[in-house]
Amino acid sequence: MTTREITSRDNPLLVRLRKMAQTPAGYRRQGQVWVEGDHLCRAALARGVTVPVAVATEAALANPALAGLLSAAAEVVIVPAALFAGFSGLESPAALGFLLDLPPPQPPLAGVPTVVLDGVQDAGNVGSVLRSASALGVVQVLALQGTAALWSPKVLRAGMGAHFNLRLAEGLTAQALDALAVPMVATSSHAADVLPHAALPSPCAWVFGHEGQGVSAALMQRCTLTVCIPQPGGEESLNVAAAAAICLYESARRQ
């Protein structure tokens, strides 16, 4: 581990971090992801992620628990707290973060439990779906074009480390789903098959759509099954992240 100190706001590394913090999909151009806070950093290390660069304040370096996280990085960059706050996405800056290389694009895997996101736009919803997917045995999450950027700061925070336990692909077209080789299942309030009694295929690819418009008609036609989640309270619909948690739990329960 090497250590260096940066004190200039105009340093290229800090300029890049500010751009990444301000632009949700900026990581695509940079080829790197900013992972902030001790929880996400621990999650990355627990999954064996290589850390080229860590950025922290002097206070973080002086904290034995945080210093242990920083020691996993090839390089540690120390910055003043005021400069760290300039690219922090947290109300209370966590004082450390990892700058990770963006995982290379990977094609969809065939024959594994999958989640497909079709235009889910709220970053909090996307992160929550990833968290449920990781907890409930999903292997991969495939985001079609129009879905919120999977590695954006808000999605990372909502995912709580799930990113490092999933195979992720984004910017896909519906045609890419031909490679899945598993039945696709969607939800609809008008479906005749009702959870938890519906005959779910296993494995399958659960498809979750846009918060307002739902799954696109073209993608719905590709689905082998549509199921309804009973709502005895009478609400018109469920939040997409809540619906995903229910559906993924039902698939996991049957295993």
Image (cartoon, rainbow, N blue to C red):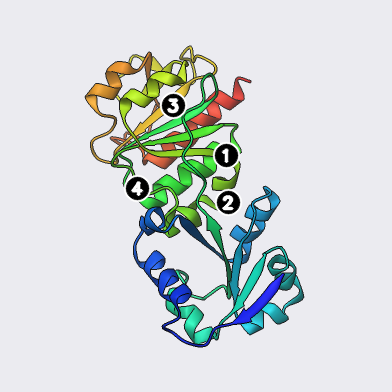
| Label 2, label 3: how far apart the Cα atoms are | 21 Å
CB under 8 Å between discs 2 and 3: no
Residue 38, percent from left and from top: 63, 65
CB under 8 Å between discs 2 and 4: no
| Label 2, label 4: how far apart the Cα atoms are | 17 Å
The residue carrying mark 1 is: 134
Number of the label disc, if any, that sits on residue 206: 3
Residue at 39% in and 19% down: 178
Q: Of residues 220 and 33, which is closer to you in this image?
A: 33
Residue 147, percent from left and from top: 33, 42
Sequence-first disc among 2 and 1: 1
Whether residue 55 can be seen here: yes
The residue carrying mark 4 is: 148
Few, some or many residues within 10 Å of mark 3 (<14, 14–19, 20+): many
Q: Secondary structure at mark 1?
A: helix
Residue at 53% in and 25% down: 113
Q: Of residues 141 and 27, which is closer to you in this image?
A: 27
Q: Is residue 87 above or below residue 124?
A: below
| Label 2, label 1: how far apart the Cα atoms are | 9 Å
- For the N terminus, give its image quadrant: bottom right
Sequence-first disc among 4 and 1: 1
Name which residue type carries label 3: Trp
Q: Secondary structure at mark 3?
A: strand
The residue carrying mark 2 is: 161
Q: Is residue 244 above or below residue 47?
A: above
Name which residue type carries label 2: Gly
Q: Quadrant of residue 226?
A: top left
Sequence-first disc among 1 and 3: 1
Few, some or many residues within 10 Å of mark 4 (<14, 14–19, 20+): many
CB under 8 Å between discs 2 and 1: yes
Q: Is residue 162 above or below residue 189?
A: below
| Label 4, label 1: how far apart the Cα atoms are | 18 Å
